[in-house]
Amino acid sequence: MRADGRRSYEALLAAADEMFTVHGPGAPLDAIARRAGVSNATLYRHFPDRRDLLVAVCVTEVEALCALGEELLTEPAGAQALDKWLRAYVDHVRAKHGLAAAFASGGREDSVFVAACQAPVEAIGTALLARAIDEGAVRPDVKMVDVTTLLNAIAMATEATRDPLKTEGLLTIVVNGIARSTTKRTQAKTRRESKA
């Protein structure tokens, strides 16, 4: 893709991301083109139909969430890294819930696409969770699929009000629910140190 084509493609993705977040997946395509500063013809050259644009926005968002997870894996404290990622996940789902719903109501091709997007998110979430479990900060019986189910529920429950205090309160319940008690963490740390 030529440089000018790449610029218009990226401008369209940014505009679509913003418009879909504010207006949902039915945001007018001509308004997206105007916001990106390109013609409708340019929009349709890059994205022949609405679904193509929705797919591109979703893939970009999933890649960003996974990149954040990879970055957080390098942080020294696994529990804090997991906590940051869980909060980013809720923000992501709440902002993009309309997009997920658009694909959820589609046919087999859409369900395959949704599964393909969920797989890398679950994988990076599982890696962050495993690190927190290894540190003794999270109970070993916790599974990421269960955590993301709870996070999806929080995102949907707080989507309409977007009340940060409500979101924080619900997230705190989840984080406290998956955490090991301080006593158990101390015992696990002592056991690890005695084995060293």
Image: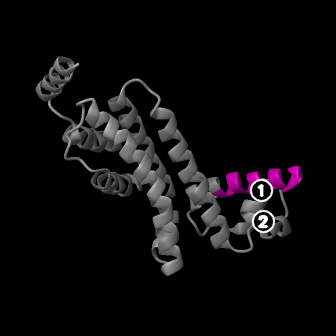
Q: Which residue is mark 1?
A: 9
Rendered location of residue 84, percent (x, y): 41, 35
User: What residue sits 16% from the left and 18% below the top?
Assistant: 194
Name the residue located 35 percent from the left edge and 30 percent from the top edge: 78
Residue 95 rendering spot, x and y as whole percentages: 50, 53
The quadrant the N terminus occupies is bottom right
Identify the secondary structure beneath mark 1: helix
Which secondary structure dominates the residues rendered in magenta? helix
Q: Is residue 111 above or below residue 98?
A: below
The kind of residue on which mark 1 rests is Tyr
The residue sitting at the front extreme is 196
Q: Say which of 72 and 165 sits in front.
A: 72
Residue for point 48% across, 50% down: 92
**What residue did someone put label 2 on?**
46
Query: Which contiguous range is marked in magenta?
Result: 1-16
Residue 11, percent across and down? 76, 52
Disc nearer the start of the sequence (1/2): 1
Q: Residues within 10 Å of mark 1 (few under 14, many from 20)?
A: many
Q: How is the image coloured?
A: one colour
